[in-house]
Structures are given as C-alpha cells and as structure tokens.
Amino acid sequence: MSNQILKGKKGIIFGALDERSIAWKTALACVAEGAEIVLTNAPIALRMGKIKELSVLCNNAPVIPADATSMADLDALMQQSMEHFGGKVDFILHSIGMSPNVRKSIGYTETNYENFLKTLDISALSLHRVCQSAMKADALNEWGSVLGLSYIAAQRTFPGYNDMADAKAVLESIARSFGYHYGFKKKVRVNTISQSPTVTTAGSGVSGFDAFLTYAEKMSPLGNASAEDCANYCVMMFSDYTRMVTMQNLFHDGGFSFTGVSTAIVEDITKANS
Ligand SMILES: NC(=O)c1ccc[n+]([C@@H]2O[C@H](COP(=O)([O-])OP(=O)(O)OC[C@H]3O[C@@H](n4cnc5c(N)ncnc54)[C@H](O)[C@@H]3O)[C@@H](O)[C@H]2O)c1
C-alpha cells in the first residue's frame, strides 16, 4: 500500500548490505512512497554486498561509496548527491553499526580498546560526521529529517550486546545534541529509532542473538517489530507528518521497552521450576 507520502522528496540511505538489512527495506519503502534516493555504503560492503541489485529495484538509484568514518568520503557524498538531485536533500538514513570486539568475540570486560574506539567511531560518531558534513555543505532542506537506528541496550544492560551498548548510548546522545543545533540553525530534525532485535548481518553477530529474539518476542505485547515495520516507521519520520519531532529516541519494539514481565515468560519459568 502506498500513499506517496514522500513524493518529491530526495534522500540518502546508508547501510543497505543485503536484502535482510533494515536500510534495504527502508530504501524500497521510500521509493514506493514516491522518494528519489541515493544509496551508499562502505567501499568494502559495496564489493561484498548486493547493493547493485537494490539500485535496480530503486529506479537505478546511484550507488556512491563512502566510509562513514571518513570526512572526505562524506563530503564527496554530499556534493555528488546534490549534483545528482540537482538540489538539496530532504532526508538521510544512518543505518550503520559494527563492533570489531563483537566480531572477534572479545567480551566486554576484556575489551580491546582499539577495537572499542572503532566501534564508537563507526557506530556512533559517524552520525555526528554525517550531520556535520551535511550542515557544512548546506545539503539538507529546511524541515529535513536525519534518522539513526538504535537499540534498547543504550538504556538497559544486555550483556551480549557488548560495546555496541555504549555506542548506541552515544548515538542517541548525538541525535539529541546535534538535533538541538540543526533545529535552531536550519529547522532540520535528528532522531533515532530504537528497533526490536531483527535478523540481519549486524544483528545476528551479537552473542546469544536467537535467545534475545525469542525473549523479546515473548515479552512484547505486539511481538517483535520486523525490518519492514521499521522501514515504514522510517518513511513516516521522513515525511511531513513528523515535522515537529526532533531530538528523540523513539522505541519501535512492540511495547518491549515498557513491559516489566509478560505472562508467557512467567509461564515458561513456572514450567521450568515445577
Ligand atoms: N538487527 C538488529 O537486531 C538491530 C536492532 C536495533 C538496531 N539495529 C541497528 O540497525 C542498523 C542497521 O543494521 P542492520 O541490522 O540492518 O544490519 P546490516 O549488517 O545489514 O547493516 C549494517 C550496515 O553498516 C554498514 N557499515 C559498517 N561499517 C561501515 C562504515 N565504516 N561506513 C559505512 N557503512 C558501514 C555495513 O556495511 C552494513 O551495510 C545498525 O545501526 C544496527 O545497530 C539493528
């Protein structure tokens, strides 16, 4: 179902690696709602992933490589995107996450600090870089929308999430802080969506992910939000219907974040104890 709520809008989508990626589904949803987009990812991800297939599905959207930790790459991306669109951009999806400590199964208390800094640089500071690069180039139209994707480990401890929890706390803080400055300066809004656990390359790398997924499903009154649901929420956040929403971390998790315990979990434990 499409209501063309992004008709005439132009956006940059970071982070579509393969068809499971939240950014992949969001790119498709934005185009279905009438947007024109540019796709981008780290050069290595472009070589290994399937983004060319996505480009075809998105009316041959240009694919521009950019490592989100490189200001030079981001500045070039802003310029090339504006050249392509023949003007400014209305929305940016930052759908980027990577932890070398998670990848190498190095536990939180034994962390490797070089890896930790990379986690923060790739998964959190990159949102600041994206906003700074866009602001410097004056790449976003007034009432533009920048969105990052977060996880509730920013507020509560999920031990397997490792240093990504700290990265998400910083990411949400950057959305708040940059949102303040971007709002006053250019009427641009900056938010994060805190999504349910979702089966993707980044998601599945977290230790105990399957247990996470089942636990969250049983705890959430509406069940886990899918990547498609998340894509639809992103579309709404890019649309004019959410013009006055900024500096927020928005839970998109079927009610998980505000549920203390569910009957299903109580029944499981009662059964296990009997
Ligand atoms: N999957 C989940 O359970 C879940 C839950 C909540 C939030 N999120 C967040 O959603 C976002 C998207 O993740 P996903 O689950 O779709 O997984 P994904 O693996 O499909 O996407 C992660 C993307 O980050 C990109 N990336 C990594 N390093 C980069 C760099 N240096 N420069 C540019 N791009 C880089 C990867 O190439 C990949 O496309 C992440 O921020 C993730 O933390 C995921």
Image (cartoon, grey):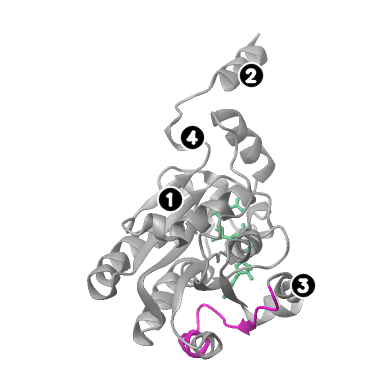
Q: Is residue 213 above or below residue 227?
A: above
- C-alpha gap between disc 3 and disc 2: 43 Å
Question: Looking at the image, is mark 2 or mark 1 earlier in the sequence?
Answer: 1
Question: Looking at the image, is mark 2 or mark 4 earlier in the sequence?
Answer: 4
The amino acid on which the numbered mark 4 sits, given as a three-letter code, is Gly
Residue 255's disc is 4
Under circle 4, the secondary element is loop
Labelled pair 3, 4 in contact (Cβ < 8 Å): no
Residue located 52% across and 58% down the image: 235
Question: Looking at the image, is mark 1 or mark 4 earlier in the sequence?
Answer: 1
Question: Looking at the image, is mark 3 or mark 4 earlier in the sequence?
Answer: 3
Residue located 53% across and 53% down the image: 162
Residue at numbered disc 3 = 53
Residue 154 seen: yes
Residue 268's disc is 2
Residue located 62% across and 78% down the image: 42
